[in-house]
Amino acid sequence: MARQKAEESPADKDHRYPGKIVLFTGGLTFLGTLVSAVAVVVAAVINAPDTVRDVLGDNVVVTHTVTATATVTPSRTASPGESDSFPQGAEVALSTGKALTRVGCGETGFNRTEGDWNDRSDLIGGAVNPAPGIGCDVMDGKSASGTLDFLVPNGATEFTAEVGIDRESPNTSPQVEFSVLGLDGQVLAKQMATYTTSATVTARISGTPRITLKILVVKSDGTSMDNSFRVAWISPRFKLGT
């Protein structure tokens, strides 16, 4: 057998090698096809990232490399304290249209008659001329109350307003408590005002997402439709910055 192998003719050798050559050639062909396919993908990613994104979906970020990374960005829900942002040092005036909720001024109970909050100019305390603000008519009850809620703008550090009772009111006897409450009902500022004496309410509101402006009638000789009075927040505003 050894003699047969040693004496194998060149023709026999040529007959035995073609299979190996075919296998080797096929491997090179597959490798070449694979390289070509990768080249096509790379070219698609580099030259047409938008098309690749359309095929793979909206949550795919296509970079100018061979890698396409899928990412998911969670939706963001604004907190109650997030509203419009304003430049530092600005003042943001409040109005009834900006209030989230409004509870008219009136006595607690089934027969409560509420006066509506509205925007207008009032003359309070020792002022010489009426000034614009937010007011409410108290038409009945000796312990009437009313509230307005506002979102605090980003960057706001202070709320301020002049408060009092409009001097055109028929009833000149009331004492009214004006207060600013935080989201949890905490009293941030409080002042008393009368027909002849106004006051300035200033509350630090950094980190407070929402405030409530509240009035409470502490004393009155009597209130009726013919003996009403008007409470007023004059120039209520947020201050931004330090």
Image (cartoon, helix red, strand yellow):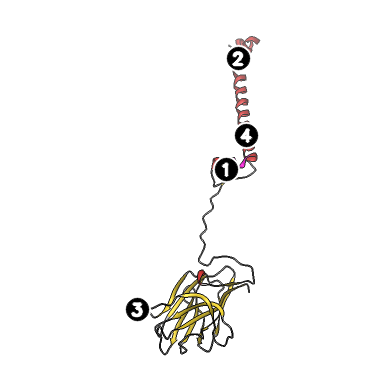
Q: Is residue 241 magenta?
A: no
* Quarter containing the C terminus: bottom right
Q: Amino acid at mark 3?
A: Asn
Q: Amino acid at mark 2?
A: Arg
Q: Nearer the viewer, mark 4 or mark 1?
A: 1
Furthest residue to the left? 110
Give the residue type that dot 4 points to: Val
The residue sitting at 45% across, 75% down in the picture is: 116
Location of mark 1 (residue): 53
Return the residue at label 2.
Answer: 16
In this rendering, the answer to whether 106 lies above or below 175 is above
Q: Which residue is mark 3?
A: 111
Separation (CA) of disc 4 from disc 1? 16 Å
Tell me the SS state at disc 4.
helix
Q: Nearer the viewer, mark 2 or mark 1?
A: 1
Q: Main secondary structure of the magenta part?
A: helix
Whichever of labels 4 and 1 marks the residue nearer the N terminus, that label is: 4
Disc 3 is placed on an element classified as loop
Between disc 2 and disc 4, whose residue precedes?
Answer: 2
For residue 20, above or below residue 46: above
- The spot of residue 48 in percent (x, y) is 62, 40
Residue assigned mark 4: 40
